[in-house]
Amino acid sequence: MDAILLQILNGLDKGSAYALIALGLTLIFGTLGVVNFAHGALFMIGAFCAVTLQRIFTLSYVTLDESQKDFLGNPLKVETPYVQSWFGESLGAGIIDWSVPLAILFCIPVMVLIGFVMERGLIKHFYKRPHADQILVTFGLAIVLQEIIKYFYGANPIPTPAPELFRGSFDFGVLLGFDPNAIIYPYWRLVYFAFSAVIIGGVFAFLQFTTFGMVVRAGMADRETVGMLGINIDKRFTIMFGIAAAVAGLAGVMYAPINSPNYHMGMDFLVLSFVVVVVGGMGSLPGAVLAGFLLGILESFASMNEVKNILPGIDQIIIYVVAIIILLTRPRGLMGRKGVMEE
Amino acid sequence: MSKSNFTRRGLLKTGAVAGAAGLSLPTYLRADGHSGFTNAPTGSTVTLGFNVPQTGPYAEEGLDELRAQELAVQHLNGEGDGGMMNTFSSKALQGNGILGKKVEFVTGDTQTKSDAARASAKSMIEKDGAIMINGGSSSGVAVAVQGLCQEAGVIFMAGLTHSNDTTGKDKKANGFRHFFNAYMSGAALAPVLQNAYGADRRAYHLTADYTWGWTQQASMQAATEAMGWQTVNNVLTPLASTDFSSYIAPVLNSGADVLVLNHYGGNMVNSLTNAVQFGLQDKMVNGKQFEIVVPLYSELMAAGAGANVQGVFGSMNWNWQLQDEGSKAFTQSFGEKYGRPPSNSAHTCYVQTLLYADAVERAGTFNPCGVVEALEGFEFDGLGNGPVLYRADDHQCFKDVLVMKGTENPTNQYDTLEIVEVTPRAQVEYEPDHPMFAGGDLGACNPGA
């Protein structure tokens, strides 16, 4: 029982990342009809927003310490961050420690801007082109974005730790009456899950309870009719692209402490997120979220020793097996709408 | 020991066969009629092929290898301060290229994929006339390229490859490894772990599911069980994994009190980061502090893992903090040129390039079979790691091994690992027919004709 609970917990944070990326993908597909293979790169750029802010906070001035030597035998260069010099050692260290949560504020305008530039500068020229063209151009864009990040940040993973307050793990086992250490779970992953829930809830509330959201939903259902009512739906869809980019970026920012960001981390999530979108149902926002969590949890279960002993290698293919089963039994996915991608 | 074809009669025979078959063979298998071996240099230059990951997850490691290889070429051509050529026990190299020919180089991108690495090596041999291939950051790649070089008749001086198989079941007469291997890591680490954590420990292994991971795990398990540890479980993890939480979560509940991460590169950074996130090192299990071990370290990956490596034991082939004259000379030379200390993958590529050049000088020929004879059983010093033997039986270098620990209080960005012990060569040596290295055959050297 404790092992099952443990893997459900494990699946939640992985599922959170899948759900957030798939949500953005679905928003873009549902509004603009574009299959955006650059969406994983937006997740990666979000993570590098955290890296960038961490680097800004640790910008330092150098003093020479004659009592210590560097690897060449020269006096050691001791770096002191400006924020510690300006705000005092304790507050400065605190600011650096909280660079990942603070990066949320930095990430939102950056990602919205990147989303606008992508949509206006490139993707709008491909609206009326076949999906194959859209896939090619967005995949190419993803590679370009990757290489830009690699040029500036290198290929090595960059450690981006969570604030000290959230390091370590919570013992759920004791809380639920199991032995100590039976069900432990890192605090930051709990934060990530809660954060994802808030973002997902926020996006749904925005679409459900605002006039802007209502128009967007109407446009998703019938773009031409909304246009004939005199509403500039294209402008709203561009804004939705920016919002989708921001959602992917936020997923990346908060993921940075879970796995050190590197330039190809977007590709690691991209294919799985597309599977999530297809399983959830093309164009279905609740479907994307549901499938994200479902596949995240199933992936965790498949890595259990008990499961792997019976089905070796199942952890590598479980998501695809489930996708095949669901598409065979429910061709539109879990919550797909009739008519989407069926013409 | 490989069977060498390097005799006057052999050369005449291979030259004649090559002449007869030349038109029907691919370019890289065709020797110059007069020389009897692949890509024999005819002008005033000789071309070396540096095959390193320039894209993909090990690109940073590949970049450091390239830096070292470029430095080695400069030193061979008499430029710069000479680096380790000044401390090398063999004095055959004069700084006038190799056999008087200026050294040039071409590069290939392995992408850390076996097929891509073979394609880039093949291109350098066929199109660029490379006479030796050096570099790489993966055992899968090393085994694949070594096989290609054997077929093509050029020398392969491996870069970073740590699987027992490279000089075990997959060894080849044309291939040579200076880097240490998984068995040596286990043999060096086990006594240090016993001193630090005691003989009564229960280990849980997470292992990358490919050739290096398998041999690393088997070596660590054998070495730790020999000193009394028990192995609770060994879980194979897919190489493409990025999040190891679902593999780490059950560890504490398994009764294990040590987690051995048989992971390298991005896998190591992520699995160690995940293990630290789960707070494993803060837990008490079986009345003991829980510990993590990473058998193979690299400076670049330690930097990627950040503070998570602090206090974690591992092993390395070489480290820039060594104080022997050779290591100091290389670190100085590399540091002044690039502004950073060299990694151990840079070191092994630099040393391999010098060793190849030296072997050619001593053999008096670029013929691969002459080079093989010159390297087999070669004993040298002054290239870091103390006295070293290139064993003839398997083309594996035997030398001291470093046991490392993540620095607890780093003073600068390069201060990530500290040397805990220099394990003497005798402690990591093994017989050529050791079961972990069984099943292979060096075969005969192939001059490519």
Image (tube, coloured by chain):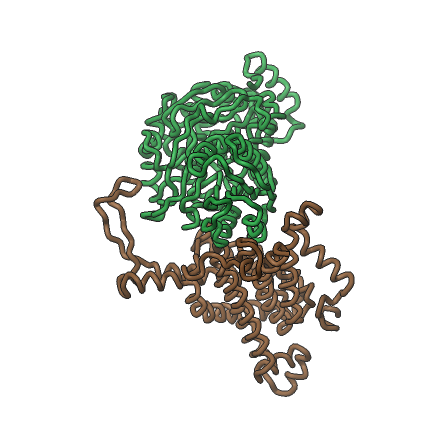
In-front residue for pair A172/B210: A172
The foreground one among B341 and B213 is B213
* Image-based side of A273 in relation to B299, left or right: right
* Residue situated furthest right in the rendering: A329
* Position of residue A23 in the picture relative to residue A162 (left or right): right
Q: Position of residue A267 (x, y in %)?
A: 57, 56
Which image quadrant is residue A141 in? Answer: bottom right
Q: Residue at x 27, y 51 (%)?
A: A78
Residue A215, by quadrant, is: bottom right
Q: Residue at x 67, y 47 (%)?
A: A308
In which quadrant will I find the N terminus of chain B? top right
Quarter of the picture holding the C terminus of chain B: top right
How far across and down, in percent of the image, does residue A129 sit?
A: 65, 67
Give the residue at x 36% y 21%.
B91
Rendered hue of chain B is: green
Using the rendered view, name the quadrant where residue A34 is placed: bottom right
Residue closest to the far bottom:
A229
Residue at the image position 45 percent from the left and 63 percent from the top: A49
Residue situated in front as seen by the camera: B37 or A107: A107
Chain A image colour: brown
Residue A33 placement, left or right of B44: right
Q: Is residue A247 above or below residue B413?
A: below
Q: Is residue B46 visible?
A: yes
User: Which residue ends up furthest to the left in the rendered image?
Assistant: A66
Q: Residue furthest top?
A: B9
Residue B309 higher or lower than B189, as above or below? below
A76 up-or-down from A249: above or below: above
Q: x, y percentage for residue B50?
A: 49, 36
Count of numbered circles on the image:
0
